Amino acid sequence: MQTDEMIILDEFCIHHHIDLTFIKSLHESGLIEIVHTEEKIYIPLSQLPYLEKLVRLFYELDINLEGIETITYLLNRMNQMQQEILQLNNRLRIYEND
Amino acid sequence: MEFIDYYKILGIEKTTSEEDIKKAYRKLARKFHPDLNPNDKEAHQKFQQINEANEVLSDPDKRKKYDTYGKDWQHADQFEQQRQSRTQSRNEDGQQFYSNSDSSDFSSFFDSMFGGSDRSNRQTKFRGQDYNAELKLNLTDALLTHQQTLTVNGKNIRITIPAGIEHGQIIKLKGYGAPGVNGGPSGDLYITFAISPHATYKRLGNDLFTTVKIDLYTALLGGETTIETLTGKVKLTVKPETQPGTKIRLKGKGFPVYKKEGETGDLYVTYEVELPNKLTEEQKKLFIELSKLK
């Protein structure tokens, strides 16, 4: 992965006024991916919206790490189920339009 | 414009302490926060109401004013001016109470009571409202990656629609929703694609399905038939003794796979055998002979 697809974690923390240990906890829980180099720690740019969402859950809604893990799991399941409903609806359309 | 009962919105009493207001707000915010209710308009609206109620009731000055003038909000400004003229010396450079700032995230009632400018002093940043839009496409539109310009809230947004987009699929455009409050991030724009059914082709995922009519003689003796696919004409070889309802697969002639360039689904063709009608006397004779050979 190229360096221009990464964000320096320190900068992210400064920008959002958050503690680096929180991000490390998210990483330890397996919720986010971080990349270590010899000098710095980075997060992939693609994870930015997701990470910002986790930050909002923690800091705005006072949800602890265990709560975030549970919510993330349930949101993923909900997303999968919505995809399944979408596919089933599209399958149903084939017969409805006959 | 109607009076809004902020206490009712947060489910608390007028005597509730600041600490308990905060708790009530947190509890409801956890339930209706947009991050926890993706694509749920009702939850988003409810969340805005909760925010507005919290904005007023968690600020001692605003709460006092709301409690004092609440139901008489239409006269609050007059009351306030009278009170100030009695207790304070006149300030020539005094800040005007009302402002024209964007009030899309708060009710008209809130703006009448507290004005837009007053809000800029608060500490909490809030994410802007998400917008939802529906974009109608034909099946053939979804066949190729193309660009379209959408007008959302008076703003033109040019988007690239990748080939293979599905009916009901939602694309999120980050930051194209309403602006955030107090420097908070802008909301997102969610575009739901509605793909109209095609007269000849049915789509299921990346595969296409169609029915082709062949005459009895081609079905029995074999032959060729040409069909018009979504991407051009294709000549099919019909095997002798093809049964009605026989399905054949044309590999790679289906729909493009979403965001996977070069990959396409398959086209399934079902043969429908048309029986001849208005038979001539000679045809009838031949069919009778055929039937005797059975």
Image (tube, coloured by chain):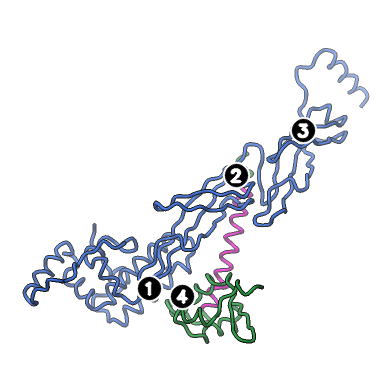
The stretch of residues the image draws in magenta is A68-93
Which is in the foreground here, disc 3 or disc 2? Answer: 2
B121 above or below A20?
A: above
According to the image, label 1 marks what residue? B125
Provide the residue designation for mark 3: B226
Mark 2, secondary structure of its residue: helix
Q: Secondary structure at mark 1?
A: loop
State the CA–CA distance, disc 1 to disc 4.
Answer: 11 Å
Distance between mark 3 and mark 2 Cα atoms: 23 Å
Q: Of residues A88 and B261, which is closer to you in this image?
A: B261
Q: At 66% from the left edge and 40% from the top edge, which residue is drawn?
A: B201
Q: Are marks 3 and 4 in contact (CB under 8 Å)?
A: no
Work out whether mark 1 precedes mark 2 in sequence or the reverse, and give the earlier one: 1
Residue A87 colored magenta?
yes
State the mark number for residue B141: 2
Which residue is located at x 59 percent, y 42 percent? B197
Question: Can you identify the residue that label 4 sits on?
Answer: A56
Residue B291, horizontal then vertical, whole percent: 89, 23
The quarter of the displayed image where residue B232 is located: top right
Q: Residues within 10 Å of mark 3 (few under 14, many from 20)?
A: few
Toward the left, the furthest residue is: B86
Residue B246 magenta = no
Look at label 1 and name its amino acid: Lys
The blue-tinted chain is: B
Image quadrant where residue B48 sits:
bottom left
Above-or-below relation of B238 to B69: above
Which callout, 3 or 1, points at the residue further toward the start of the chain? 1
